[in-house]
Image: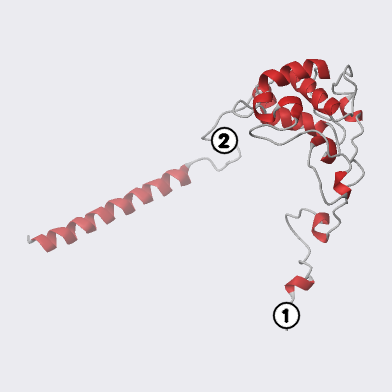
């Protein structure tokens, strides 16, 4: 038998074996039980269940308008000054007035109504828990989330005190921090653009509403 004929014969034999295998598989499946409800569905083949303890380390969101999610702990400005000197001063400078990495975190209250706005936690933040949430989540630079809850409350109290918003001995905790009245609290404008009222839809959705921007210019 010549080489081309051998290749054709080999391909035909392989095809025959494949068809025979398929036929056997169909027969076995057809001979199986008719009740498929008892057959267990395939499980997840990757990952592993996560424990509540593992989830707690990631679940650090704080609802800043009312402080929901703030952890247990407390601190005041005196304690915060000591923490700040050890872990914050190198980047933020003395008295939080600006350093080699970051600008000032003090002052600027009322400046948003002028042409020389100064952006600081005291001048911009509408709610005090924003300060706690950011410090805990991102500071100190290079070692984020290393501060204890007490340290974060203390540093928050220190920054608020430097901005004249709380007394030096005022204790900040999950109850008192949300009650600090921030100067810029009522100066935010509600975003009432149409897309902010969008409702999630998964099926039987309404047709999209055309806007002026969808109409081509003539």
> Which of marks 1 and 2 precedes in the sequence?
2
In the drawing, does residue 156 fall left or right of residue 16?
Answer: right
66 on left or right of 85: right
In the displayed structure, would residue 198 be above or below residue 75? below
Query: Based on the displayed image, in which of its 4 quarters is residue 38 positioned?
Result: top right
Q: Nearer the viewer, residue 2 or 169?
A: 169
Q: Is residue 199 left or right of residue 7?
A: right
Q: Residues within 10 Å of mark 2 (few under 14, many from 20)?
A: few
How far from the left and from the top, in percent, is residue 88?
Answer: 68, 24
Q: Which mark is residue 217?
A: 1
Q: How many marks?
A: 2
Q: CB atoms at circles 2 and 1 under 8 Å apart?
A: no
SS at badge 1: loop
Q: Residue furthest left?
A: 1
Q: Nearer the viewer, mark 2 or mark 1?
A: 1
Q: Is residue 171 above or below residue 202?
A: above
The residue under label 2 is: 40
Report the front residue among 21 and 212.
212
66 left or right of 150 in image? right
- Can residue 60 be seen here? The reply is no
Locate residue 19, reporting x and y percent. Answer: 33, 54
From mark 2 to mark 1, how far is it between C-alphas? 59 Å
**Secondary structure type for disc 2:** loop
Quadrant location of residue 137?
top right
| Residue at 86% over, 44% down | 111
Q: Quadrant of the C terminus?
A: bottom right
The part of the image, by quadrant, that contains residue 209 is bottom right
Query: How many residues crowd mark 1 within 10 Å: few (<14), some (14–19), many (20+)?
Result: few
Q: Is residue 181 above or below residue 171?
A: below
58 and 83: which is toward the camera: 83
């Amino acid at each position: 038998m010549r080489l081309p004929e051998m290749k054709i014969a080999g391909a035909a034999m392989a095809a025959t074996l494949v068809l025979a295998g398929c036929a056997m598989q169909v027969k076995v499946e057809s001979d199986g039980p008719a009740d498929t409800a008892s057959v267990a569905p395939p499980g997840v083949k990757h990952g592993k269940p996560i424990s509540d303890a593992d989830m707690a380390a990631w679940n650090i969101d704080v609802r800043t308008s009312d402080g929901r999610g703030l952890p247990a702990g407390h601190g005041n400005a005196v304690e915060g000054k000591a923490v700040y000197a050890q872990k914050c001063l190198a980047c933020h400078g003395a008295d939080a007035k600006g350093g080699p990495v970051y600008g000032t975190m003090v002052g600027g209250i009322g400046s948003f109504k002028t042409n020389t706005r100064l952006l600081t936690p005291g001048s911009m933040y509408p709610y005090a828990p924003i300060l706690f949430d950011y410090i805990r989540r991102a500071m100190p630079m290079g070692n984020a989330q290393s501060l204890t809850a007490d340290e974060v409350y203390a540093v928050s109290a220190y920054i608020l005190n430097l901005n004249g918003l709380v007394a030096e001995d005022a204790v900040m905790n999950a109850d008192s921090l949300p009650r600090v009245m921030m100067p810029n609290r009522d100066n935010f404008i509600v975003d009432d653009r149409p897309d902010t009222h969008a409702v999630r839809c998964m099926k039987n959705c309404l047709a999209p509403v055309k806007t002026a921007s969808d109409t081509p210019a003539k």
